[in-house]
Amino acid sequence: MFAHHGDVRRAQTGWTPRELDTKTATALKRRVALISRAQMSKSMAAVPARVTLRTPDGQPVTAVGHGAPVTVTGEPLELLLFAFGRNAVHVDLVGQDDVVSAVQLGKRGF
């Protein structure tokens, strides 16, 4: 439901990320790790990158794929939406420009 709720909120002009309490953010971080390991690695198999999702405090959430490293940094909800293939997210992607572009344009989600 967080992804669908985020879709509705982000379809509006001037949207801002939803602020979550610590308990909810922690639960989402666990969910992102499970989703990423189970599904994202399959959907990103064609992308030549090792994608690491991490929170702003530097904690890695999960890593999937093979190839040049790309780090995606964001709050747990933003990482969840990124993993689901949404593009209206507040995340920072760091890596080689061509590999970052491949991750952005590649299939994510399920």
Image: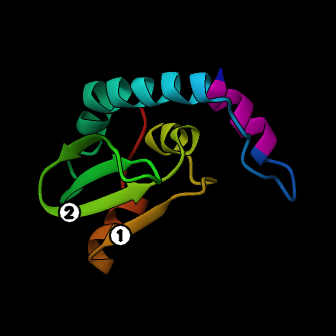
Q: Residue at x 28, y 50 (%)?
A: 52
Answer whether residue 3 is magenta in the image.
yes
Residue 69: mark in rendering: 2
Q: Residue at x 49, y 46 (%)?
A: 82
Q: How dense is the environment of label 2, judged by Cα within 10 Å: few (below 14), some, or many (20 and up)?
A: some
N-terminal-most mark, 2 or 1:
2
Q: Quadrant of residue 30?
A: top left
**For mark 1, what is the residue?**
94
Residue 81: x and y, percent? 54, 40
Identity of the amino acid at label 2? Pro
Q: Residue at x 42, y 31 (%)?
A: 32
Residue 33: x and y, percent? 34, 30
Residue 109: x and y, percent? 43, 37
Judged by its main secondary structure, the magenta piece is helix
The magenta segment? 2-9
Answer whether residue 4 is magenta in the image.
yes
Q: How dense is the environment of label 1, judged by Cα within 10 Å: few (below 14), some, or many (20 and up)?
A: some
In the foreground, 80 or 19 = 19
The answer to whether 19 is drawn above or below residue 33 in the figure is below
Q: Quadrant of residue 108?
A: top left
In the foreground, 87 or 95 = 95
| CA distance for labels 2 and 1 | 8 Å
